[in-house]
């Protein structure tokens, strides 16, 4: 019997325990012979665990009001939105049952352009690597001029930007700067704790589909990101993933709530 050709889909099947037992040996041999696919498999495995940590508390949260309104909407609205509702419900079921390795991490979100989330996370990580290590010139506007920084960056990136208060997580605002991001612009806010650990909040205007996830590679900072409500938001740092995920949830909640209050 000739071994079949494997591909990225089989990596997800293997990670989710859905690859047939009789194909496992041939699959492992294929991975060893394809270093690029082996590295990708390792990254997907790391992402899966990081995403579970980042979203663990989501299963205990109440159903968002916007979803309740969608379910309770009139028949016409329900019919036109049913496809998107069931896509979201399917993703939630996959998360709750532990099947996030293949579907969620393979697509990086529902309906999002393949690779777009990765590119966004990579831009955020690149900015962090360049500026977080700077001592004197890490930011353009210091936290002492926070109000000006907030209004200036908001005008430049075309979004109502807030500066999340992360003191409960042990971080103080250092300041911010304006950066290029793809064809547009991004705001980067830098925070630091008492031990000198730094994290960055990278924010852009993002009109694409909803997505969230964790981007992690060996020996590089980790990015926890969301693309939602017109924002692209990534929290980047070299912290333990559980702590970074907690900081990210706090920062993102404040970012969205602050923007909605100021509309």
Image (cartoon, rainbow, N blue to C red):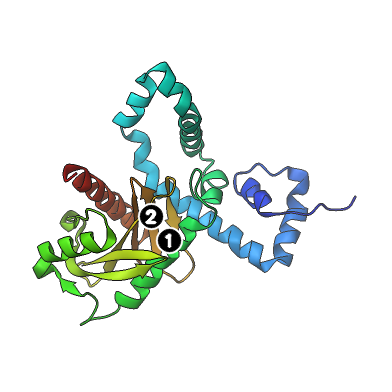
The residue depicted at 19 percent of the width and 47 percent of the height is 258
Label 1 secondary element: helix
Image depth: mark 2 or mark 1 in front = 1
Is residue 194 shown to the viewer in this render? no
| 171 left or right of 244 in image | left
| Crowding at mark 1 (Cα within 10 Å: few <14, some 14-19, many 20+) | many
Determine whether 105 is above or below 88 in the image: below
- Front residue of 70/239: it is 70
Contact (CB < 8 A) between labels 2 and 1? yes
| Residue 227 showing in the rendered view | yes
- Can you say whether 19 is above or below 41 in the image? above
The residue sitting at 34% across, 41% down in the picture is: 57
Say which element carries label 2.
strand
Residue 99 lies, in percent from the top left, at: 54, 41
Query: Could you tell which of marks 2 and 1 lies nearer the N-terminus?
Result: 1
Instruction: Give the side of residue 128 with respect to residue 116, left or right.
Output: left
Read off the residue under disc 2. Answer: 225
- State the quadrant of the C terminus: top left
The residue pinned by badge 1 equals 120
Q: How crowded is mark 2: few (under 14 residues within 10 Å), some or many (20 or more)?
A: many
Q: In this view, does 178 lie to the left or right of 52?
A: left
């Amino acid at each position: 019997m000739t071994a079949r050709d494997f591909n990225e889909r089989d990596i997800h099947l293997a990670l989710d325990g859905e690859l047939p037992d009789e194909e496992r040996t041939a699959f492992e041999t294929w991975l060893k012979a394809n270093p690029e696919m082996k590295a990708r498999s390792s990254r997907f495995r790391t992402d899966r665990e990081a995403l579970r940590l980042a979203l663990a508390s989501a299963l205990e949260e109440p159903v968002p009001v916007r979803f309740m309104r969608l379910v309770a909407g009139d028949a016409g609205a329900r019919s036109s939105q049913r496809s998107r509702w069931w896509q979201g419900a399917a993703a939630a079921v996959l998360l709750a049952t532990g099947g996030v390795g293949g579907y969620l991490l393979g697509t990086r979100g529902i309906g999002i352009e393949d690779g777009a989330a990765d590119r966004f996370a990579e831009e955020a990580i690149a900015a962090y690597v360049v500026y977080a290590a700077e001592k004197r010139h890490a930011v353009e506007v210091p936290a002492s001029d926070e109000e000006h920084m907030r209004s200036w960056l908001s005008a430049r990136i075309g979004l109502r930007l807030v500066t999340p208060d992360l003191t409960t997580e042990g971080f103080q605002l250092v300041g911010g700067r304006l950066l290029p991001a793809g064809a547009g612009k991004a705001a980067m806010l830098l925070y630091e704790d008492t031990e000198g650990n730094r994290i960055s909040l990278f924010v852009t205007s993002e009109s694409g589909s909803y997505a969230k996830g964790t981007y992690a590679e060996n020996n590089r900072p980790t990015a926890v990101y969301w693309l939602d409500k017109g924002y692209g938001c990534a929290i980047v740092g070299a912290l333990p993933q559980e702590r970074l995920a907690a900081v990210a949830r706090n920062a993102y909640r404040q970012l969205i709530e602050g923007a909605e209050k100021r509309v």
